[in-house]
Structures are given as C-alpha cells and as structure tokens.
Amino acid sequence: MKNKLILILMLCLTMHLAAQNTVQNFSLDEAIQFALENNRIAKNASRDIEAAEKQKWETIATGLPQLSAYIDYNNWIKQQVSLLPGEIVGGEPGTFVPIAFGTKQTVNATAILNQKIFDGSYIVGLQSAKVFLQISEMAKEKTDLEVRRNVINTYGNVLMAEEGLTILESNIAVLEKNIFETTKMFENGLDEEESVEQLQITLAGLQSSLNYTKRLKTLSYQMLNIVLGQDINVPISLSDSLENLTLINLNDNLLNAPVDIENNIDYQIAQNELISKELLVKLEKSRALPQVDAFINGGYSGNNENFQFLNNNQQWYGSSLFGVSMQIPIFSSLERTASTQRAQINLEIATDNLTEVEQQLMLQIETAKNLFQLAVQDYENKKLSLALAERIEAKNETKFFEGISSSFDLRQAQTQLYTTQQEYLNTMLDVITTKADLETLLNTINQ
C-alpha cells in the first residue's frame, strides 16, 4: 500500500513538472486572442457587463408586481386594559370598569400584492438601465482595445530582445575572432598592443550590452505573460519574427482612409455620458409628476387564550382589501427646481466635454498618423543606413588587418555599426507600435 502511494505521488509530480515544462507557442494573433479571453482586466470587464444586465433587470422588476407575505404572532405577557363607563354594566355614573379586549394570543397571516401604475422616475430608470448597460459594453470594448495594444507592444519588446541577443552574440563572436588574430599579430611583432586593447574595450561594451539584454528578455517574457493573463513564469515561445511583423504593418492604407470620429470608443463613451446627463434632467423633471400605486391584500387572523393555532378546530377569520394611492408633489421649497437646474448645468458641461473630446481625438489621430508615417520613413532610412554601416565596418576590418587603417578607425566603424543595428531594431518596433496606436484610435480592427 505504501509503495502504491509513493508511486502515485511520483506520477503526480512528474505530470505537474511536465505541465510546467510545456512551452506555449504564440503567433501575434494567437497571443491577442488568448489575452482577450484570459487577461484578468478583460475578464473583469466581461463580468461588469453581466452585472449591468442584472442591474437592468433589477430596475425593470421594480415596476412589475411585487408579492410579499407576513405572519405575525402576538402573545400578551400582560394584556392591555381599557376603561369603560360604569353605567354600561349597571354601575354608578362617573365610574369606570377595567376590561381587557381580545384574547391573550393572536396570529395574523397576510399577503400583499403591489403594482406600480404610473411613476415618471421609473420610466426614466428603464432608459437609464439601458444606457448603463451600454456604458459597460463600451468599457469592455475599450478594455479589449487596450489589451490588444498592450499585447502588440509587449510581443514586440520580446522579439526585439531576442533579435538584440542574436545580433550581440554574432558581433561578440566576430570581435573575439578579431582579438585572437590581432593578439597573434602583436605577439609576432606585426601590430601594437594598443590595437588589442582597443578591441578589448569594444568587446567589454558588447558583453555588458549582452548581459543587460538577457535580463531585459526575461522581464519582457514575464510582462507578456502578465498581459496574457497567466503566471509570469509560464514558458512561452513566439512564432512571429520582428521583421515579418514590420513588413506586414508597412501598409499605409490607414493614412489615406477617411476618419469617422464616431468609431472611436472614447467618443462613443463621451456621447453616452451626454445621454446619461439628458436622462438625469428628465429624472429631475419627472419628480414633479404624480405617482400612482395599487395594492390588494388578503389574510387570516386567529385568536386564542392558549397556543392552539395548529388545531383543526381553530377559528380563522379572513379579510381582504383593495386600494389605490396617489402621491402628488405640490411644494418642495424649490428643491426640485434646484435639482433640475443642477442637472441642466451638468448636461451643458457634458455637451462641451463631447466637443472637447472630439477635437482632442482629431488631434490625436493626426498625431498618430504622423508618428506612424515617420516610423515607416525612419525604418526605410535605418535599413539603408544599416547596409552602409555593415559595408563600412567590413572595409575597415579588411584595411586594419592589411595594416592600412588603425585600430581606432576599426573601433569607430564597429561602434557605428552596433549603434545602427540597435536603431534599426527600434525603428521596426516603432512601426509595429505606432500602427497599433493608430488602429486603436480609429477602432478599425473589427471592420
């Protein structure tokens, strides 16, 4: 039995370790879809919609029939006494006779049905519940757009770290070979020691960059896991490359597409805010209208000196009542007037806010277009610069080993190449992220 238990525990541990070591592979589109389903903020936004749907039904239900029941049991510890004039029972005028009415114990069971007939605030409340649901749905859409943009940014950062590591390792391998050959030349008296030292300084800088990039890569993977909605240490791999994503995003159709500001989610939210303020004005005005409610109730009551209400011979007396009530607001010392005026002021503020949001968004869209266009142009320029820097470095390396140029010239060419390589990676990431920013503002992703 003990051996079986140990075997089961070892099997469970093996399965757990295997599950931990399973590497999840994501393309960018797969990562976005995974995040939309598993990102914690996105899931909470979905829950907010569910809560808004429940709240909408709560509002609707307040205008539907409401049925409630009550059961009351009373037991007089000391029964209340009333005084009757003495002459009723043949006594002297001016005297009183103490009498206790009713029985010591009573039970009353009542059911009441209430129905709202007219209430202006209820009508406005129904409209507000619909708007509140739309607000939650828009918040979800905005959250999804932000999650998508965050996935693109973090996915791109991981790819840039990976590409940076590859380039650095390649540069270090080439430089170590150069140092080895230069050292041999120095040992044979064909070169100066300074040439070796210059290359060693360059190598030290590359190794520092390599160590930094390795740490950055780890942090980038952890950040991507957070955005995806899973544990930061889950092993993942990315199937897209930085260059392929850059080429896909070079399409500039969005730059020439007509701008429909109403597609922007922030503009839609501001519009909904304006509608909400309009409904608040209606609500305050509706408080001056009468409220009409109807009710019907029915019940039974039983009386006894002792607790014998469960006996079959207990007498029960039924009663029922129907009624309609109307509440008519007449004078509130100008409270309703002040509330309506305050709601009207808030409506005017919301109107101006909508105009301000529209103008700000138009500026943001134009800025995003310019940034994307500049990123594309910068990418093309840096691509050409990289090719030039590679040729210059190769020429200086050849000249150095032929003894035509100095180690200082070679180091300068190498430093220029390394800087251009990093700038080229940055421009590729810029193309991807600025395109994502523009798509988010235009909200053309699902169109």
Image (cartoon, helix red, strand yellow):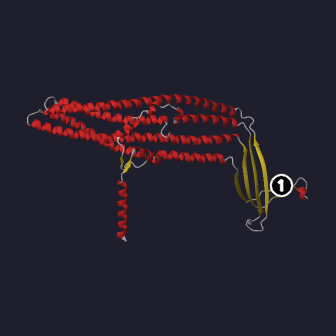
Few, some or many C-alpha atoms within 10 Å of disc 1 (few <14, some 14-19, many ≥20)?
Answer: few
Q: Residue at x 19, y 36 (%)?
A: 200
Relative placement, left or right, of 380 versus 393 is right
Q: Position of residue 163 (x, y in %)?
A: 31, 40
Relative placement, left or right, of 407 versus 245 is left
Task: Identify the amino acid type marked 1.
Answer: Leu
Relative placement, left or right, of 51 versus 432 is right
Q: Position of residue 96 (x, y in %)?
A: 86, 55
**Count of labels in the image:** 1
Q: Quadrant of residue 385?
A: top left
Q: Residue at x 33, y 44 (%)?
A: 218
Q: Quadrant of the N terminus?
A: bottom left
**Residue that sits furthest to the left in the current view:** 188
Q: Residue at x 76, y 59 (%)?
A: 300
Q: Quadrant of residue 190?
A: top left
Q: Position of residue 141 (x, y in %)?
A: 51, 41
What SS does tag 1 mark?
Answer: strand
Q: Position of residue 213 (x, y in %)?
A: 30, 40
The residue carrying mark 1 is 83
Q: Residue at x 34, y 69 (%)?
A: 3
Q: Is residue 404 above or below residue 148?
A: above
